[in-house]
Amino acid sequence: MSSDALIKQYCKELRFGKNLYDNYKKIQAADYADFLAQLLKLELENRELTRKNRNLRAAGFDVIKTFEGYSFSQVQIPPALDIEQLKTASFIDKKENLILYGPVGTGKSHLATAIGVAACSSGKRVKFFRTASLVNQLSEAKAKGELKRFLRVIEKTDLLICDEWGYIPFEKEGSQLLFQVISECYERRSVIITTNLEFSKWNGIFYDEKLTSAIIDRLVHHSHLLVYTGPSHRLTHSTMKSQ
């Protein structure tokens, strides 16, 4: 068997990435040690890329969004936080939360997703849900006797993103299940919420003042509030305006 065939076989048996076999011939090295160092670096980079892609798939983003072209001009960021911390998702290491509040269409979901994507790229485990969908999945899991299994998925994450929080009111069971998730996340992992409802109106989502207060209490502690101003980006850039 030729050397090339042996390398291909060994790469497969050792479960090295295909990228290593495809590119090992391109390595220019001064000696064997240098060649091995570059080969191992290539495999490490391949595994890192594979891990990032796996994290992105597991996150469940509706659409992949990044910070490219994103404008913070109409976002009020609190003094304790800066844009760099958002772009690197470093607040996750401190188990801090973000509440993105403002009118519909101002870029809250885009920012939440971009932060989530950045977190995946840095090796963090992320789960993205539209809040109504999360509550539905929790209710279905409970009905099937699979709630503990579903919650374990969330327990393994570093960042939970609840998009469109408060767009749809919940029944009693759904509210209790969502409270259970938020309570489990408290001081264990970061949560990002996007909402167009001020805190005083959250009781209209849960219909239980004590439950609402308990959820707000857990979310606000260790949290940063980002306030969005200005018109809806979707309306501003709608093709209907030019018709």
Image (spheres, rainbow, N blue to C red):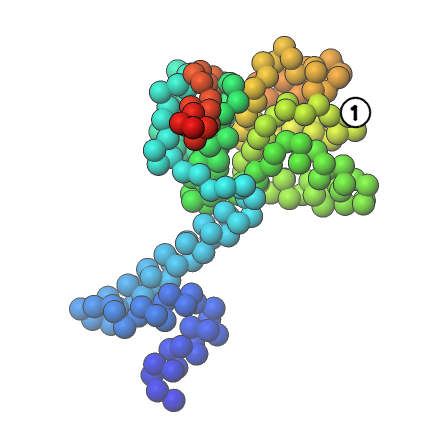
State the quadrant of the N terminus. Answer: bottom left
State the quadrant of the C terminus. Answer: top left
Q: Picture coordinates of residue 155 (x, y %)?
A: 63, 39
Q: Nearer the viewer, residue 66 or 178?
A: 66
Tell me the residue at 41%/54% (across/down): 49
Q: Is residue 90 visible?
A: no
Q: Nearer the viewer, residue 136 or 55?
A: 136
Counting other residues with Cα less than 10 Å from the Cα at mark 1, is it few (<14), some (14-19), or many (20 or more)? few
Q: Picture coordinates of residue 3 (x, y %)?
A: 33, 83
Q: Nearer the viewer, residue 86 or 103?
A: 103
- The residue at which mark 1 appears reads as 172
Q: Picture coordinates of residue 117 (x, y %)?
A: 45, 40
Going by the image, does 159 lie left or right of 47?
A: right
View extreme (front): residue: 243
View extreme (bottom): residue: 1
Count every numbered label the image shows and give the total.
1
Q: Picture coordinates of residue 53 (x, y %)?
A: 47, 52
Depicted 170 relative to depicted 152: above or below = above
Amino acid under disc 1: Lys
Q: Is residue 195 visible?
A: yes
Tell me the residue at 46%/73% (across/down): 12
As helix, strand or loop, the secondary structure at mark 1 comes to helix
Depicted 79 relative to depicted 141: above or below = above
Q: Nearer the viewer, residue 127 or 81?
A: 127
View extreme (left): residue: 30
The quarter of the displayed image where residue 91 is located? top left
